[in-house]
Image (cartoon, rainbow, N blue to C red):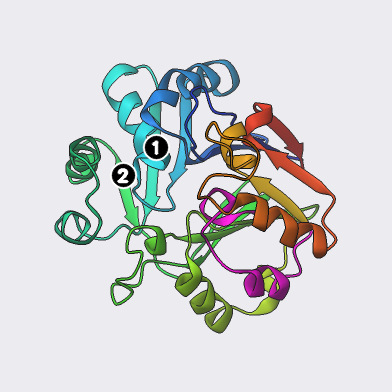
Amino acid sequence: MADFYLLGNSTYSQMFGCVIQTETKTVVIDGGSFGDTNQLADFLREKANSHVDAWFFTHPHHDHIGSFYGIRRSSPDITVDNIYHCFPSTESLKQYGARNDDEKRMWEDIDEWSLSYNVHKLSPKERFSFDDVSIQVLRVFNPNMLNNFVNNSSAVYRIENANKSFLILGDLGVEGGYEVMESCPLELLIADYTQMAHHGQGGVDRKFYEYIKLKRCIWASPDWLWNNDTGNGFDTARFQTVKTRKWAEELGVTEHFIEKDGTQKIEF
């Protein structure tokens, strides 16, 4: 048996982070924004004795790597054995994906990770085992996919044991979704739980969710994003979350695990 924790956000911002605990191991995927640093650090102190065996990242946007950046600076008591990612180079991130100076500083920090941690650059089809749980790499960064560059650099992971399976999509966009459909066997994409791409809006398209036979949804969505409401009422902002919710409903999904509802545990 193992536990999958979807982390709730500790600020009003969108973020994605999850923690997997097996019988003896703790694995983090992404972790959240810089504002979620204290939440994640406290969780790891309470649940994992301040130790992470493996930290996997999907892509280097601040709302996915920010809490790790914060822990590096403010929580020296938390130890990390191994880091796994397939990020673009810092130079290409700045060239094609720069959004603000804070994020640039986080990207520059990535180059220093190997000085403090054992960093493993991922390759497709790699599989890692943590007690009875395996994490398989289904997709890594494609340097030729320049549209929606950083989101489409997202690694895709399949997490499973004998009981349940999870598909982690990061912030994968439409183009990345089609690449996954073309390159991965369908049986590896069908999962009991799917993390909805790009916080459930503006990620992969409906064809992708139809193809993988969507069953249960994991949403990295705060309340305002879940309702597409930034102050003017339900579904009045520019985000596509409500549209994606409709897709899920039409595909027969009835179970949802949503960031806005706080940290949630799925036993598997």
Q: Is residue 205 magenta?
A: yes
Above or below — where is 103 with respect to 133?
Answer: above
Total count of labels: 2
- Residue at x 66% of width, y 57% of height: 244
Q: Nearer the viewer, residue 253 or 113?
A: 253
Above or below — where is 6 with respect to 73?
Answer: below
* 258 relative to 29 in the view: left or right: right
Instruction: Point out which mark residue 118 bears.
Output: 2
> Percent x, y for residue 116?
24, 35
Name the amino acid type tagged 2: Asn
| Crowd tier of the residue under label 1, counting other residues whose Cα lies within 10 Å: few below 14, some 14–19, many 20 or above | few
Name the amino acid type tagged 1: Asp
- Residue at x 18% of width, y 46% of height: 111
In the image, farthest residue toward the bottom: 182
* 61 relative to 168 in the view: left or right: left
* 197 relative to 266 in the view: left or right: left
| Crowd tier of the residue under label 2, counting other residues whose Cα lies within 10 Å: few below 14, some 14–19, many 20 or above | few
Magenta span covers which residues? 194-215
Residue under numbered circle 1: 81
> Percent x, y for residue 113?
24, 41
**Residue 259 visible, this angle:** yes
Above or below — where is 110 with respect to 7?
Answer: below
In space, the residues marked 1 and 2 are separated at their CA atoms by 7 Å
- Asked if disc 1 and disc 2 are in contact, CB closer than 8 Å, the reply is yes
